[in-house]
Image: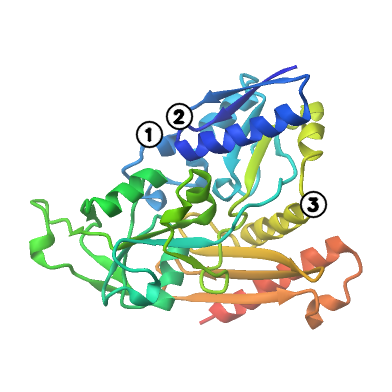
Amino acid sequence: MRYYVGTRGSKLALVQTNYVIDRLKEAYPEDEFESVVIKTTGDIQADRQLDKIGSKGIFVKEIEEELADGRIQLAVHSLKDMPEEPEAGLTFAKAWKREDSRDVLVLKNAKTLDELPQGAVIGTGSKRRKYQLLKLRPDLKVVGIRGNIDTRLRKLYEGEPVCEGETALSAGAEKTVDDTAKDELGTNRLILDGIVIAAAGITRIGRAEEISQYMSVDEIIPAPAQGTLALELRADNTELLAKLNALADEDTDRCVQMERAFLKQIGGDCHTPVAAYCDINDGELELRAMYGSEDGSRLASTRVTEADDDVAECASQNEIMAKMVDVAVGRICQKLQP
């Protein structure tokens, strides 16, 4: 059987897709797998901030259309970029083993977050990272940045000015940059001191040696399903689904299910800071979660384990998972009440 595998054209997307194809070829040598590059709205509008464009679907819409029409049989995405539910007629295979889920700092002239000077400029395209970073260092200026990982690293190392509207956000307040740093349109132009990105992404493209600091999941809770690939296909393609699921990692799949269940239940989207990370320690599930207002003025986080009183009486694994998500959402909503 010949399968066409759809992907975006970035270096990271191609590395991820080639990894999937290599595993499938090894497991199913009787089949043929070929990648197909598809350009998405998110790729075309690469100069706009993610929360200004629309939903997470900007990176997948065109690929899913090819999938639904049968021109490709499988699509490979980063699961953290996927909407909570697949389009009608499509489904996700069980998750394969997750890579490093943490966020990392890449810094130009410092080795750690603590070494950064007062008011240092950090670039990220994520409100989740932005507001959690500002909790650790309220003095930082955290600015929006787009582009693939190579592009972001180039902007950092070459000192390319980054435009950030009229102001740079810092700890919930607005700080105007010196007028000398503005271009003829009055837009602030800032020089990056560092960027914060996903550990899995920079590692996958072979540039892990440039990481300055790994942020623990207690310092910055990752995005739901960060470090995990999404394998999407038509729901009626049961033969391919069985082949993909045979290569799944059950622990990763359980954790990712909980993280995405939290995302769906809390109502998170690209406009709000939302985080969820599930791990299994000594055989027990542990869920960290965070949610906040769009402007970051209100943030709440929590940690739920199987041993918590609210969860301990649940009998089945599915009941435990559902209850832990319910408890996390309830605690966060309570904390965010005026």
Residue at the top extreme of this rendering: 1
Foreground mark, 3 or 2?
Answer: 3
Residue 171, can we see it? no
**Quarter of the figure with the N terminus:** top right
Ranked by sequence position, the earlier of labels 1 and 2 is 2
SS type, badge 1: helix
Residue 285, can we see it? yes
Distance (Cα) linking label 3 and label 1: 36 Å
Q: Which residue, given by chain and number where applicable, does mark 3 sit on?
A: 250
Ranked by sequence position, the earlier of labels 3 and 2 is 2
The residue at the point 43 percent across, 77 percent down is 135
The residue at the point 52 percent across, 73 percent down is 219
Check residue 44 in the rendering and tell me which mark sits there, or answer none.
1
Q: Nearer the viewer, residue 203 or 45?
A: 203
Residue type at tag 2: Lys
Distance (Cα) linking label 1 and label 2: 7 Å
Residue type at tag 3: Glu
Task: Residue 186: name its quadrant.
Answer: bottom left
**Proximity of marks 1 and 2: CB atoms separated by less than 8 Å:** yes
The residue at the point 66 percent across, 56 percent down is 260
